[in-house]
Amino acid sequence: MTQAKFLIAGTLILGSLGFLMYTGISESMVIYYDVTQLLDKSTPLEKRGVRLTGQVKPGSIDLHRDQSRVDFLVYDQTSALSIPVTYQGDIPDTFQERAEVVVEGRYDREERLFHARVLLAKCPSKYEQQDEIDRPVNAGSTD
């Protein structure tokens, strides 16, 4: 009788832990898309989050400092397609026109608007300058 109680209790505990792990992992998973893939109507948009990558379209940044909100377009250079994005929160210092960005959130097909919860920006010129500094001067000369 005591062995059966331990077996039932162990099964319940393991089942509960498994359920909690499954729900925690599935809710935190995001799917990575570029602009073209996200606009493809056959792309399934589950209830999970979506991560979108692209570049900030020049002239599209509309900054609302009083609300710490920014609206902008993320575009794909190869296809020239773009998606409007709205983000409210801390705006990275590296966020600027033509910067590579990754936004995470949800895309509303009816509104045709990406509601971002996370905004990550990278400034390519900052890293290119560092490469030039690291590169030896006259590396191939025989002075």
Image (cartoon, rainbow, N blue to C red):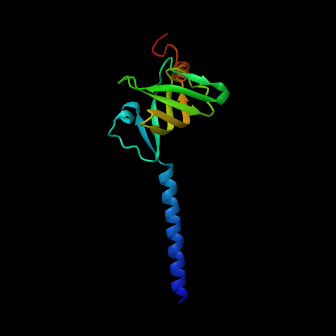
* In this view, 134 is above or below 19: above
Residue drawn at x 53%, y 65% is 17
Q: Give residue 101's position: percent from left, percent from top.
A: 50, 29
Farthest front residue in view:
110
The x, y position of residue 46, in whole percent, is 42, 47
Q: Is residue 103 left or right of residue 64?
A: left
In this orientation, which residue lies closer to the viewer: 35 or 128? 35
Residue 80, placed above or below residue 38: above
- Judging depth in this view, the residue of 104 and 142 nearest the camera is 104
Q: Does residue 67 sit above or below 20 in this rendering?
A: above
Toward the right, the furthest residue is: 66
Return the residue found at the far left.
42
At x 49%, y 69%, the residue is 15
Of residues 46 and 7, the one drawn nearer to the viewer in this rendering: 46
Classify residue 112 by image quadrant.
top left
- Residue drawn 49% across the image and 63% down it: 19
> Measured from the top left, where is residue 120 in percent x and y?
54, 33
- The mark tally for this picture is 0
Residue at image location 40% in from the left, 31% down from the top: 35
